[in-house]
Image: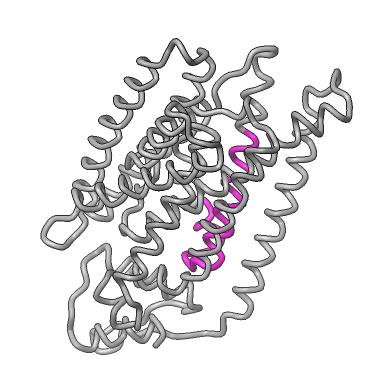
Amino acid sequence: MKLTQIYCDFRRKQIHLGKSDLWRAKSLARCEGAKGLQETDGVRGMVALSTKGLKFQRWQVLLAAAVLLGITALAASFVGAATLTAEQIFALRLPRILLAILVGASLASSGTCLQALFRNPLADPFILGISAGGALGAAAALLFGAPSFAIPFAAFLAALGTSWLVYWLGRVNGVVRMDTLLLAGVAVNAFLSSMLTLLLYLNAHRLLVSAVYFWLMGGFQMATWREVWMMLPYALLGLLLPIYQARALNALLFGEEWAHYAGVEVEVVKRWLLAAAALSCGAAVSVAGIIGFVGLMAPHLVRLLLGPHHRTLVLGAALFGAWLLLCCDTVSRTIVRPAELPVGIFTAFLGVPFFLFLLRQAKKVFG
């Protein structure tokens, strides 16, 4: 059953929508091709139109984004490379560029999943503490001598556990409230970040200063081909699963009850999608440290261009997140040459004002 039909059925049954639910219904109606809402005897109905043109336009935007990402990657490979040979570019610069693309795409797809699952526009792996949990798991596995292939898996398990903890803490009387979820995420993030700092401090004799900065603020200065191949399967799995479950993500924007009426096995889908978000985030922090706000900015900005349909939104957010993080990394390694700044500084410069703007807008919409 179409989501627009579900919406109309609820309206005919005189089930009243809150302001935020009505906004979600209008958004999803647009993603299915509805031209708008019209008044008929006080009951809102939807006028469905063909979506072929809209789909074509969305895929055009995605193709343009992929071309832009390719051009940016090509340009980044030669920025500051005047003294590098072709072999050095292949061995040092190219894996760094590819790793930045994979990490940016993974963080963006993780943020898109979390915003749909929690029905919270402010959900982000960094803000909710999931990145800190993954970094703690990866750092612990590394310091206790785990093999390199097991480090992303340890980060995934820690990120998954953190996701469920934040979800459980933010759920009150069966409802995940925006303010409760944010407070739970901030508290968990502070606790896990302090645990990570303590772990790094106790093992300072085994670490370089750059390694401490790496885990706390993120970066790609230690990128090699091994990290690229280690990250690739996790990034692909974390991206393809939300795309496959795009219809379920669309339905969950209405709420769990509405998704159930649309034929979605809500609890099963939630478990799978939460695992996908944790997998993407955990793998990203295991190779790049904690990088914030990419998963917050990318879905919102792409949603303005492509609409809320998750089949194109997840892919578009991944492309934009990859492009954004690649640009931030290029700036971080060139602005104070020969030194490098942590890439997390630049994502925070962009993300904090963006977060405050969303917080202000969310107060207007959700009260």
Left or right, 253 with respect to 366, comes to right
Numbered disc total: 0
| 326 is within the stretch colored magenta | yes
| Quarter of the image where one finds residue 288 | top right
Point 46% across, 51% down: residue: 279
Residue 14 position, x and y percent, is: 17, 84
Point 65% across, 18% down: residue: 335
Q: Can residue 67 be seen in this view?
A: yes
Q: What is the span of residues highlighted in magenta in the rendered image?
A: 300-327
Residue 173 position, x and y percent, is: 11, 60
Residue 227 position, x and y percent, is: 63, 38
Q: Is residue 352 visible?
A: no
| Quarter of the image where one finds residue 21 | bottom left
Point 34% across, 60% down: residue: 117
Point 25% across, 47% down: residue: 166
Task: Examine the rendered structure and indicate whether residue 187 appears above or below residue 121.
Answer: above
Give the image's coloring scheme: one colour
Q: Main structural element of the magenta stretch: helix, strand or loop?
A: helix
| 192 is within the stretch colored magenta | no
Task: Examine the rendered structure and indicate whether residue 321 appears above or below residue 353.
Answer: below
